[in-house]
């Protein structure tokens, strides 16, 4: 079983449209949406939901106002500026924790002299399993302002692996998040293959080089493809040269095609919709499909 | 006055709006690039960077001579960054959130803190714009501490614009916290609309006043406009889908320079945002007691 993760560094370069098309082309894949902040893949793959699981991770501090003596120790020990006094009738009545600012470190809980701070598990979001027209899918939504997006990504990938193993699926296709920090690290570690979708812009090349450094750091075999390449052919050349200089392979170019947006509006994949970009995506997929899995010990890193 | 430029979805044009807005505002104006994973404002503003500081996060250091293997530090740590099983504690710096809990619970004073570098804060100027950006080290998982380090450079006078990371999770919260207004940038596609809704929910949860900029609009799609109308969200600006804009972006040029007729639109956006902040402040003066989001 091979696991392909589509990432980009910069957002909005076509990760989701590509992953959706690969799902249509692979035929025998489990699909995982790991862009847990803003997951969009389900808008195109329309999974029939089979189950929802609450995602709990870490804890959050909550002060029982009735037991609080307003001593302020909790505020003093908090390094995240998450504890604030609450005033009633112009007098400090008690302290309260801003749930969004709280990191769940538990220091205030431990040092409250009145033991007035509870520390329940935190619900950080949920993940769902579903069945699409191209195979099973796991997708998630992180709670707004929630921490631990990396752990939710790891959870989604593990669930996708479990399903893939049970079904003997050939592929796991992962729609990754933008950026280079914790959810991206959680998405790529232990993958067989990463595809970086780049647009031919100065921002695109800048961000590609940073995310390339990341895939090299975690030793994930990497391919690059330039999306909307003819918007700037010269920049496309530069990107491809830079990618090859960095030791990664090229997976092909995808032309600019309004059919990509039209397909999205119709809620179908680009290859189902057809057109020039669809042809290009097929060519990219056939390149990726030939890559042999060279993972030594595939493991998902916890961040 | 602090204005955040945010979005749920990536690649909708946050950086374009932030950089062009900064160029259209009068002095004193400061731009903070808080998209520290992929900072791109510098590509368009081409600032002369003359200051650079490493940003750090505190991590525990164990003095083994003082440690009595009691294991309190390991029990305190919620992040598995320090592990002690009746042994000398092992520290995993990359997992540490710098809460200082281990240090406080250690009964023998065996733990001190050292600084772990996570990225760089760079400063400079571009024309009349004071510029600050964070650049996260590649391989570093935690961006919020660096975002907070960048935000320590918020200007006391004039306008500060904050270019935020995409999404709705902790890095975005770190970037928009304490701002006076948020400009949510979206595109009129199903993905754009879906992620705009998440961004709107985020702003409402934070009780932050906001408006929307719709980028790359065409005559055929009205879904975002329709959503904003139903939700009573002001649409501050629509930028038409124009190949000249895309090409200017691709070459790292500012729209207000490459497509001069759009300069007026950006100037209108500036005055619209500023007057909204002023009228919002006049309507609800900041209260002294409890902070937003605290019950």
Image (spheres, coloured by chain):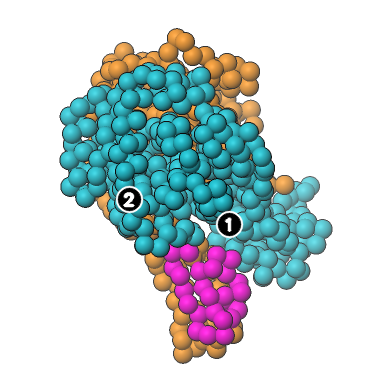
Task: Give the left or right position of residue A121, taking residue A284 as reference.
Answer: right
Mark 1 sits on what residue? A103
Q: Are marks 2 and 1 on the same chain?
A: yes
Q: Which residue is mark 2?
A: A292
Chain letter, colour cyan in render: A
Direction front: furthest residue: A168
Describe the element under mark 1 as helix, strand or loop. Answer: loop
Q: Colour of chain B?
A: orange
Cα distance between the residues tagged 2 and 1:
41 Å
User: Which residue is drawn at the image coordinates 36% and 19% (left, top)?
Assistant: A275
Question: Does B73 appear in magenta?
Answer: yes
Asked whether, in this view, residue A108 is left or right of residue A202, the answer is right
Q: Is residue B23 above or below residue B227?
A: below
Q: Quadrant of residue B14?
A: top left
Question: Which residue appears at 67% of the width and 42% of the height?
Answer: A51
- Give the residue drawn at x 48%, y 40%: A28
The magenta span reads B71-95
């Amino acid at each position: 079983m091979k696991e392909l993760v589509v990432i980009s560094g910069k957002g909005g370069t076509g990760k989701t449209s590509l992953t959706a098309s690969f799902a249509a082309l692979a035929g025998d894949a489990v699909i995982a949406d790991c862009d847990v902040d803003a997951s969009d893949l389900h808008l195109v793959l329309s999974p029939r939901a089979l189950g929802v699981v609450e995602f709990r991770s870490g804890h959050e501090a909550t002060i029982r106002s009735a037991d609080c003596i307003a001593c302020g120790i909790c505020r003093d020990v908090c390094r995240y500026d998450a504890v604030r006094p609450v005033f009633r009738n112009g007098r400090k009545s008690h302290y309260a924790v801003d749930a969004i600012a709280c990191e769940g470190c538990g220091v205030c809980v431990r040092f409250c002299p009145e033991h007035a701070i509870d520390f329940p598990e935190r619900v950080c979001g949920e993940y769902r399993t579903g069945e699409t027209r191209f195979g099973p899918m796991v997708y998630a939504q992180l709670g707004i302002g929630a921490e631990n997006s990396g752990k939710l990504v790891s959870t989604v990938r593990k669930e996708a692996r479990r399903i893939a193993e049970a079904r003997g699926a050939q592929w796991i296709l992962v729609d990754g998040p933008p950026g280079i920090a914790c959810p991206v690290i959680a998405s790529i570690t232990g993958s067989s293959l990463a595809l970086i979708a780049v647009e031919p812009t100065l921002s695109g090349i800048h961000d590609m080089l940073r995310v390339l450094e990341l895939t090299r750091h975690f030793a994930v075999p990497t391919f690059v493809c330039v999306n909307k390449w003819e918007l700037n052919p010269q920049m496309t050349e530069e990107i491809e040269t830079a990618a090859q200089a960095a030791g990664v392979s090229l997976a092909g170019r995808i032309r600019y095609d309004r059919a990509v947006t039209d397909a999205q509006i119709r809620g179908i994949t680009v290859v189902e919709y057809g057109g020039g970009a669809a042809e290009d995506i097929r060519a990219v997929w056939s390149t990726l499909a030939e890559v042999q899995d060279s993972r030594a010990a595939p493991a998902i890193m916890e961040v | 006055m602090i204005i955040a430029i945010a979005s749920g979805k990536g690649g909708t044009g946050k950086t374009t709006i932030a950089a062009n807005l900064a160029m259209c505002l009068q002095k004193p104006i400061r731009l903070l690039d808080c998209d520290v994973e992929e900072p791109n404002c510098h590509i368009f503003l081409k600032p002369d960077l003359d200051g650079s500081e490493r940003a750090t996060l505190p991590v525990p250091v164990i003095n083994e001579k003082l440690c009595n293997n009691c294991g309190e530090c390991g029990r305190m740590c919620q992040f598995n960054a320090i592990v002690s099983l009746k042994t000398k504690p092992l520290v995993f710096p990359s997992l540490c959130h710098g809460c200082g809990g281990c240090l406080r619970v250690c009964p023998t004073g065996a733990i001190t803190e050292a600084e772990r570098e996570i990225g760089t804060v760079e400063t400079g100027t571009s024309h009349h714009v004071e510029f600050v950006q964070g650049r996260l080290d590649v391989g570093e998982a935690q961006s919020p501490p660096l975002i907070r380090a960048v935000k320590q450079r918020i200007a006391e006078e004039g306008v500060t614009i904050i270019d935020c990371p995409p999404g709705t999770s902790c890095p975005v919260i770190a970037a928009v916290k304490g701002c006076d207004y948020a400009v949510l940038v979206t595109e009129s596609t199903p993905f754009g609309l879906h992620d705009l809704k998440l961004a709107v929910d985020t702003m409402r949860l934070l009780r932050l006043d906001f408006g929307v900029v719709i980028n790359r609009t065409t005559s055929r799609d009205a879904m975002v406009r329709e959503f904003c109308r139903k939700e009573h969200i002001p649409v501050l600006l629509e930028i038409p889908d124009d190949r000249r804009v895309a090409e200017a972006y691709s070459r790292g040029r500012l729209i207000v320079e490459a497509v001069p007729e759009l300069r007026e639109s950006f100037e209108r956006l500036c005055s619209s945002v500023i007057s909204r902040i002023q009228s919002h402040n006049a309507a609800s003066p900041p209260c002294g007691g409890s902070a937003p989001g605290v019950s």
